[in-house]
Image (cartoon, rainbow, N blue to C red):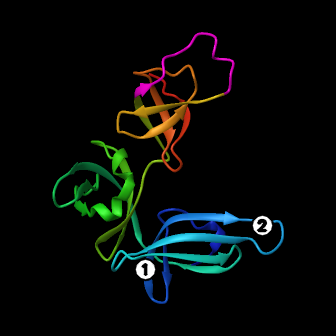
């Protein structure tokens, strides 16, 4: 299936010269002069080699057909990360290089989308938002709620994010998994 380059997102699988690649990052650049381009970092599925491509945003790219289903995360061991398909109870082991930096969000029971091609998991897609607990941040200062400046904080899984001044240690917040930004305070 052909799609325009500007529509590519992290986790998409594309076919270039007969080889499958998973999109790691995709950024659209619109310079003042010249043609807008999409800069894409890819990982070749067959051997894990990382490559960069640059396409015009309107250029057609072949998106590969992969089976995408929801799985529950179970646990991690020496083999890799174990997931279970909730309807058939079929288990899949995903290698650490496929999971990558997303492993910090894998907690017992989290639902993720796995893209499977020929029985092998090739990409993982996290939920757009997750709830984390703040374990380290500067103390709350009274009267600072009016300012729009954010302060650094560390979540229970080690992720560093910027949060509003009124967020203290022990507060649960919702963050965006794509860019690690604060969304809102979690409703308890």
Q: Residues within 10 Å of mark 2 (few under 14, many from 20)?
A: few
Front residue of 18/119: it is: 18
Instruction: List x then y, in percent, for residue 90.
Output: 22, 60
Can you tell which of label 2 and label 1 is closer to the viewer? 2
- Tell whether 12 sits left or right of 79: right
Front residue of 143/78: it is: 143
Image quadrant containing the C terminus:
top left
Instruction: List x then y, in percent, for residue 74.
Output: 23, 48
Residue 31 image label:
2
- Quickly name the residue at label 1: 20
- In the displayed structure, 30 sits above or below 141; it is below
Instruction: List x then y, in percent, for residue 140.
Output: 52, 16
Under circle 2, the secondary element is loop
- Tell whether 174 sits left or right of 97: right
Instruction: Tell me the magenta residue range.
Output: 135-148
Front residue of 58/47: it is: 47
Identity of the residue furthest to the top in this view: 142
Name the residue located 61 percent from the left edge and 70 percent from the top edge: 39
- In the displayed structure, 103 sits above or below 90; it is above
- In the displayed structure, 168 sits above or below 63; it is above
Image quadrant containing the N terminus:
bottom right
């Amino acid at each position: 299936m052909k799609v325009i380059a500007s529509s590519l997102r992290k986790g998409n699988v594309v076919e270039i010269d007969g080889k499958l690649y998973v999109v790691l990052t995709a950024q659209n650049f619109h310079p003042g002069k010249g043609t807008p381009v999409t800069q894409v970092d890819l990982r070749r599925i067959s051997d894990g080699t990382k490559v960069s491509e640059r396409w015009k945003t309107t250029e057609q790219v072949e998106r590969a057909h992969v089976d995408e289903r929801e799985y529950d995360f179970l646990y991690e061991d020496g083999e890799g990360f174990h997931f279970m398909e909730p309807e058939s109870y079929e288990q899949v082991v995903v290698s650490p290089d496929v999971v990558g930096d997303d492993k910090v969000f894998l907690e017992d029971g989290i639902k993720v989308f796995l893209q499977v091609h020929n029985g092998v998991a090739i990409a993982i897609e996290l939920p757009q938002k997750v709830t984390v607990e703040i374990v380290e941040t500067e103390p709350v200062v009274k009267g600072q709620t009016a300012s729009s400046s954010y302060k650094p904080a560390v979540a229970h899984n080690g992720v560093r994010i910027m949060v509003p001044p009124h967020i203290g240690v022990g507060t649960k917040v919702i963050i965006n998994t794509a860019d690690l930004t604060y969304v809102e305070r979690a409703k308890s």
